[in-house]
Amino acid sequence: MSGASTIMAGWMNAALDGLVREGLERRALTDGLRGFEDGFVARDSRVDVASARRLWRRAAMLHPDPLLGFKVGAGLPVQATNVVAIIGAHSATVGEALARLLRYQQLVSNSGVYHATDEAQGLRLTYMPTPGPVDAHRLQIESVLGSTAGRRAGLNGSGVRPARVILMAGAPAPRSIYEDFLDLPVEFAARAGLVFARADLARPIPGADPRLLELNMAYAEGLLHDQDRDEALCAHVQAVIRRAGFETASVADTAGELGLSLRSLQRRLTEAGVSFTQLRDETRMREAMLLLTQSRLPLAELARGLGYSQESAFSRAVKAWWGLTPRKLRQDAESA
């Protein structure tokens, strides 16, 4: 997979299933979004974070329930996080399970990460969305919080739930609505997150098997190593492409700038599951999305800056990649 921020299919499909259970139509959520086919993400693949964030924005427009994110997150099956869930379930204590969640969370999603801070009351996990051309919607963030806080059995069946939930300021419903649903104290701040009481961190997780933990951590470490290696290579290639220009960048020149032979670069890209052409197109289209949604540049000027001689060619490329014309993408961003 390329160096772009992505979310694994298991999580995204489980979230989609949850949205459908809440009454939304799968096709209305996914139609035209890159990475989705017949309303699903292909198994063993990953979907671009920008597409996932656009999906959550659609969900917010189609379903006004302020608890939608928490309802979906609380209903996610353990399979949605794959090996990360298994590692948590077989960690000896809640504190160890949370530490391993922090280490392996990128295997599930690069849309955002928890950052841990020690406080007098315990451990604070602050959710930090990854910067990108499409901002994370609060419902998507709350689905992540809900997957950790929303289960009555507690984290990994330990019976431990957060001491309090922190929601982003500007929530569309009163505090009491969230507290009644979560059965937890809620406060508001600039960043969403969870706080676990210090005494709960030492609570044991029933049925934890050290041998299963060891086997699955070894597997996760291998996945993490491969992902870090592949993402670093792709990020270097994308940086060279931006410097060289989308129309003039070539795989041979890029290999030379990275100190690799042409054959070595092509082999390593193949191992990462991507080609130079795919990386170049992806880089240009992510830049296009960023400029369309976060600037007011005229489309003709934007097209020229991205290496297109005609605005019509730019429009066709954007629609083929993102599923909507540049004007519609900009309108959607303004109305979100």
Image (cartoon, helix red, strand yellow):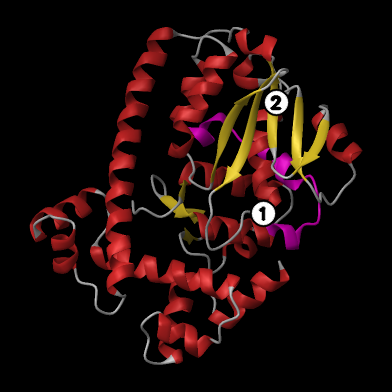
Q: Residue 267 carries which label?
A: none
Q: Which amino acid does label 2 sit on?
A: Val
User: Which label's residue is closer to the chain start, 1 or 2?
Assistant: 1
Check the image and report above or below for 81 versus 239: above
Q: Examine the residues drawn in magenta and state their main secondary structure.
A: helix
What is the quadrant of residue 293 in the picture?
A: bottom right
Mark 2 crowd level (few <14, some 14–19, many ≥20, 10 Å Cα)? many
In the rendered image, residue 93, in percent from the top left (x then y), is placed at: 56, 11
Q: Horizontal and vertical percent for residue 263?
A: 9, 57
Cα gap from disc 1 to disc 2, whole angstroms = 21 Å
Percent coordinates x, y for residue 133 in the rendering: 53, 63
Q: Is residue 257 left or right of residue 61?
A: left
Which residue is found at the position 34% from the left and 70% from the top?
Answer: 281
Three-letter code, disc 1: His
Considering the numbered disc 1 on the image, is that residue within a helix, a strand or a loop? Answer: loop
Q: Is residue 199 magenta?
A: no
Give the magenta range.
59-82
Say whether residue 23 is left or right of residue 250: right
Residue of label 2: 195
Residue 137's disc number: 1
From the viewer's perspective, is the residue at label 1 or at label 2 nearer? Answer: 2
Q: Locate residue 267 relative to residue 191 in the image: left or right.
A: left
